[in-house]
Amino acid sequence: MTELPSEYHRRLPYGERMSAEPLLGGPFFPFEGDLQVVPLADPVLPEPPRRGEEGGEPCPKCADPDRFAIWRDEQWQLKTFAAGGLPFVAVLEPHEHYRLDNLPPELTATLGPLIQRVANAIRQIDGVGRTHFSRWGDGSEHFHLWFLARPAGMMQLRGAMIAAWDDVLPKIPDEELTANARLVAAALVEDGGEAVGIGLS
């Protein structure tokens, strides 16, 4: 095994299965029964490059910038993808290739207000109670922020497991996703930017 870089790493039980018991019965955990946790894998050090990093695969956003886009302005673009189980899931990305830690101050200053705009636009979809947003940056270096629409009253879908619910709930019809994407884009256009092709294929 590669030399482990910290005391945290050194005390973990690599190769062993841990109990799922702390999760079972939790209000936000969508699974029950004889659930098995996969064995903990050894750390991969140094970490492999992400898409868009030197030595990694090309950045998908930079390689095909308009794919899946539904709205954009001079700095940002909102994308949505194939239908899942939630009413709407989208990703917000800057046009230029930045990480979160090197976003220029003038771009960073627009991020907070834009998060509010996107969240409010998504909440206009019929039956949406709240908009969750999260950042996972382990797949692609190009900064991106996820937005997930939580249906009203569906309290089990609160919290971090909402992304898992998107995978396990029945997929919404494609025409419903397209209508929701158009609604979100139109709501964003009210305060600037432009709606672009609803590229869901």
Image: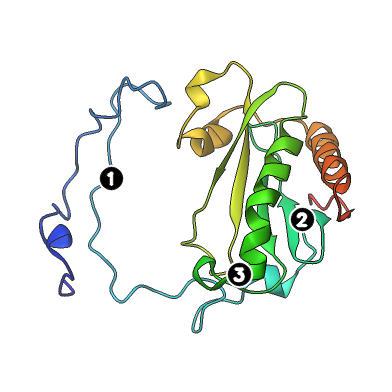
Q: Position of residue 190 (x, y in %)?
A: 88, 44
In the current view of this chain or complex, which residue is farthest to the top?
Answer: 153
Which mark, by number, is residue 68?
2
Which tag is nearer the camera, tag 2 or tag 3? 3
Q: Quadrant of residue 73?
A: bottom right
Dot 3 corresponds to which residue? 105
Q: Report helix, strand or loop for mark 3.
A: helix
Q: Report helix, strand or loop for mark 2.
A: loop
For the residues labelled 1 and 2, say whether their Cβ atoms are less than 8 Å apart.
Answer: no
Callout 2 crowding tier (Cα within 10 Å): few <14, some 14–19, many ≥20: many
Sooner in the amino-acid sequence: mark 1 or mark 2: 1
Q: Position of residue 109 (x, y in %)?
A: 64, 61
Q: Is residue 24 left or right of residue 86?
A: left
Q: Position of residue 26 (x, y in %)?
A: 34, 22
Sooner in the amino-acid sequence: mark 2 or mark 3: 2
Of the residues shown, which amino acid type is indicated by label 3? Pro
Which residue is at 51% across, 84% downward? 54
Given residues 50 and 134, the one toward you in this image is: 134
Which tag is nearer the camera, tag 1 or tag 3? 3
Dot 1 corresponds to which residue? 38
Of the residues shown, which amino acid type is indicated by label 1? Val
For the residues labelled 2 and 3, say whether their Cβ atoms are less than 8 Å apart.
Answer: no
